[in-house]
Image: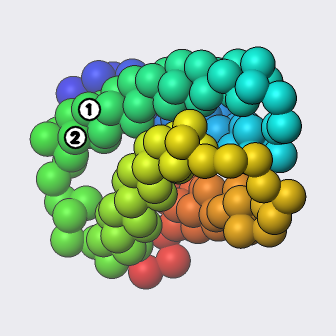
Amino acid sequence: MAAHYLWLKGLHIVFMVTWFAGLFYLPRLFIYHSAATDQASRERFAVMEVRLFAIMTIGAVLTALFGIAMLLINHALLRVGWFQVKLLLLLGLVIFHYRCFSWIGRLRDAAPSDDTRWLRWFNEIPTVFLVSIVLLAVVKPF
């Protein structure tokens, strides 16, 4: 059983990296899209955003599936404090993922904007999640 668990953990990490790659880059595309003034660029960014969102959603789903598979083997994790906090952070990450989806529609229908301040802050949110989740999983502080 332990050998299977390590394979599942490895795949969980691989697809988590895929998911986070999209979470890091998609908000950057939103910034470029928001500032684009010509229609061809705006359409190009819209296509890039949808495609990247699809790839990162596949990464998110596979991350979840391999995580659930690990929990089926080691369900005692559900009673550990650091893991419970990790699950709460994961819920926040899923909400962030959904917000990315909503930004795709907002930018598709919006006029160009010089004010990208909010999107620049939005772009930093995945970093907080990544650092917090990884440190919890490695250090297991409680």
* Proximity of marks 1 and 2: CB atoms separated by less than 8 Å: yes
Q: Quadrant of residue 129?
A: bottom right
Question: So how many labels did they put on this image?
Answer: 2
- Tag 2 residue: 68
* Residue 115 position within the rendered picture, expressed as x and y whole percent measured from the top left: 81, 64
* Residue 31 position within the rendered picture, expressed as x and y whole percent measured from the top left: 77, 48
Q: Is residue 35 left or right of residue 56?
A: right
Q: Is residue 142 above or below residue 20?
A: below
- Tag 1 residue: 65
Q: Nearer the viewer, residue 29 or 38?
A: 38
Residue drawn at (62%, 56%), measured in percent from left and top?
A: 126
Q: Is residue 121 above or below residue 81?
A: above
Q: Is residue 45 visible?
A: yes
Q: Tag 2, which secondary structure?
A: helix
**Quadrant of image for the N terminus:** top left
Residue drawn at (78%, 55%), measured in percent from left and top?
A: 113
Q: Tag 1, which secondary structure?
A: helix
Q: Is residue 101 left or right of residue 62?
A: right
The answer for how far apart the CA atoms under marks 1 and 2 are is: 5 Å
Callout 1: few (<14), some (14-19), or many (20+) C-alpha neighbours within 10 Å? some
Residue drawn at (61%, 27%), measured in percent from left and top?
A: 46
Callout 2: few (<14), some (14-19), or many (20+) C-alpha neighbours within 10 Å? some
Q: Nearer the viewer, residue 139 or 60?
A: 60
Q: Quadrant of residue 45?
A: top right
Q: Nearer the viewer, residue 53 or 134?
A: 53
